[in-house]
Image: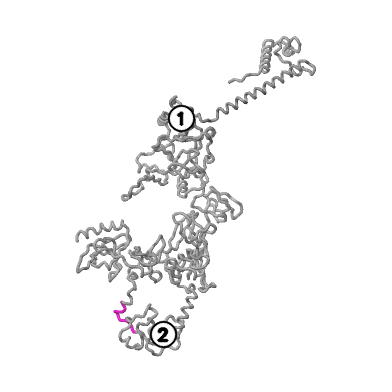
Amino acid sequence: MSREVPIAVRRFLDLEAEVDNDGLDGYEDDEQDSIDGFIDNDENSQQEHGSNVRPLFSTLRNDDAAFEDALEKITARLRNKSLRERVDATYAFDEMVSRLPCESDCPIWRVKCLTGAEESAILFLLDKASSKHELNSAFTPGSIRGWVYLECTMNHAIVALLKETPGIIQTRGGVHRQNISASDWIRTLTMKSDSSAAQQGKWVQVRKGVYKGNVGVVVNVEVWGVEVLLVPRLRSLQSSFSEPTFSKVPSKRKRKTIPNMALFDPVYFTHIVGPKPEQQDSNQYYTFAGHHFEYGLIRKKYDFHSISIATCIRLEGLSLFLQSNHPIILDTDVPRPVEWEFEVGEPVVIRSSNQEGVVLAVGDDFAEVELVNGGHIRVSWSDIYKCFKPGDFVFAMNGERSGSSGWVITVKQGIAHIIEKTVNDMKDDCGQALDQLEIHINLLKLQLEPFVQTSHLPISDRLASGLPLPDGGSLRADKTLWFGLHVTITRGPFKGFYATVKNVLANQTTSSGLKVEVQLSHISGSRPFPQELVDYDNIIESSSLLKLYDFEQPRNTLFMPKNLLAAQSITLTSRSHSSTPFPDIALSTPAWNTSFYTPSALASLSPAWDPSSCTPVVASTSFSPAWDPSSSTPTSHLSCPSPNPSTSATQNTPIHPILDRRLLNISLEVIVNGPGYNNKQLTATLIDLDGRLSIRYLSYRTSKVLQSEWVSFKNPTATRDNGLLVVIKGEHCGKLVRRIYHRKHADQVYVILAVVVKVGETERISNERLELEVDCLCVRYEESAQRKAADLLMAPLRRAK
């Protein structure tokens, strides 16, 4: 619209036009004549122009009537202008009030639609709407994607039209729509998108859809949203890797499984799915089923409300991003992996420059490092490694090897090669062994080396000096058995707390001479898992409720409690002055047994000796007058007769059948009745700990001890138990067998068995056959898959019976 030109300005323009015309017509006239013709100060000239021409203010005087007239006109004009402005303001205020929402207005709804289809949906609605739809307006903010806003009554006609509109999302409940409250109607016109994360090269986290929680990098920013590169999660590839589940019971509620992350490989994808993806300009760009792939990554579109700034990333996802070698990924600063934990003051190495330093500050996508040579530098997380040297004792905080600990051997390309000293009681080689692990160096944390009493140099010193490591056998022989035991504190300020032994200190000012450093299992807000120093007499082993020395005796006398040594010395001294010293055999057997002596030997003893007494008195002869209390067994001049072969077998027979060494490292099904166990069936194993037999079972990955008097074998049923069995009595004790069939004879049931030979996980049926009673057999634990495979091997034998 053209704006009205004021009268004074038009007059000036008209005069200018006359000057131009005069100049063109009388170009030969003198310039002075032209000026005189343009400016005429004569009074007659003013009268010829009429009364419409206003006098110039420069020609007015204070005593002139024209001045008074001009002043009066200005005052009147200003008065009329202020009145007109007040009237216009009143009209504007009334119009603003009339535009405010009221109860009679149509409500505003927002309807869900596909991202990018907002404009086409609005055009379709405005084109097809009629009076029956009662649609007053339809709009969409340019920066808010995924919704269209309608001012309507949302009657059946408009709902039916929305169902026909392209891009509108429909669910089982119909069109996805939401009513906006009247207080927010005006705000819908001023909505702005949160575009703080919308920067090219910025790492963002997806908040909606299949990729919810995934982290990607922004590669393009538009008015409606962004395009993000993500690691693909393709369901077609996930189905090819999934294993069939025949016995899985279908649940009432179907749950969608999220596919695993994997880079897009066109060759493998074509082999698995079938159709070949369409190749774009480069061999790194492909299109398939509407998806765009770049360097193995998928390109997805999201509005600004569907993303947020990413402060960290999973190590698995970051590894796949770096493997893609996408140019944008290589040029951006990656966020810190969740599994990496860096602390201020921790020594690090800059990978690109091989400079060493310490961490000063930790950010989302950078670490500030103070270099050893001086100066500060800010580096990306992909360019920083922790600094460890051979011999350092480290602990894996996260990752697949979380919880592992050991000594660093070498570090190559960010991978630390460490040796771990493990204890596995359920294997054939009981005790400690050395395993070599490979762990990313940023997953490790430096720790204090655990205390181990050994005759060797510490492992850290050997690695630092380049000496070879000791073999596993020597480590087993010199280990301190208390390290890592789960104990309970019985006295002191931490009474009743559970803890783990971390160190043992000798030559302390306690009655036992020992103090034990333990790590409490109690979680405190100020000190989570604190380490405390407690007296040896104030703790017991949690599973057996025994003192540490009674539970496992150390080989080194340095760690023998002083009060125990004093008690033993007093006992031996009292025995040295007794008139009835023990024979040699008394110290090697728990109780006196007359079966160890022949009848001739018994006749040579004093008739006053009572065989039922606990301390038998040997016939008086001449004893050594100077007995050495430091000797392990007091000696007498009476030589004990050698036992006969029949009684020797009785001596070697274990007190409990399960303590037979031929049953070592065999998982047996047993019935336990004892404190805390009421006819409970468990899978127990007999193991050898430095010459001592122990019955153990696993409870939530914790090895617990069972007393032999609590345990009884679970015998099979002769008529139907076809699982793996173990012979527990007789000359065939320890053999693995399987039932072929059974037979009855004189009220006794005998089981015909085939001896099984196992090589690793492979099982073979031998030609040896046994016929035993069920009391000589015990059920052995095995997996259901192993039992099914064994049934196929045994089927021909069972059919041939």
Q: Which of 448 and 491 is in front in this view?
A: 491
Q: Which residue lies furthest to the right in this view?
A: 63
Which of labels 2 and 1 is toward the front? 1
Q: Earlier in the sequence, mark 2 or mark 1?
A: 1
Could you say which quadrant of the image residue 639 lies in? Answer: bottom left
Question: Magenta segment: does it hold 646?
Answer: yes
- At label 2, which amino acid type do we have? Pro
Q: Is residue 465 in view from this perspective?
A: no
Residue 715: image location, x then y, percent: 29, 65
What segment carries the magenta color?
A: 641-649
Residue 345: image location, x then y, percent: 57, 56
Q: How crowded is mark 1: few (under 14 residues within 10 Å), some or many (20 or more)?
A: some
**Type of colouring:** one colour
- At label 1, which amino acid type do we have? Thr
Residue under the point 48% across and 52% down: 339
Q: As displayed, is residue 487 above or below residue 110?
A: below
Residue beneath label 1, please? Answer: 153
Could you say which quadrant of the image residue 270 lies in? Answer: top left
Residue 359: image location, x then y, percent: 57, 53
Horizontal relation, residue 64 to residue 94: left or right: right
Q: In which quarter of the image is the N terminus?
A: top right
Q: Residues within 10 Å of mark 2 (few under 14, many from 20)?
A: many
Mark sitting on residue 5: none
Q: As displayed, is residue 634 above or below residue 663?
A: below
Horizontal relation, residue 497 to residue 791: left or right: right
Question: Magenta segment: does it hold 691?
Answer: no
Secondary structure of the residue carrying numbered label 2: loop
Measure the alpha-carbon separation of dots 2 and 1: 110 Å
Residue beneath label 2, please? Answer: 581
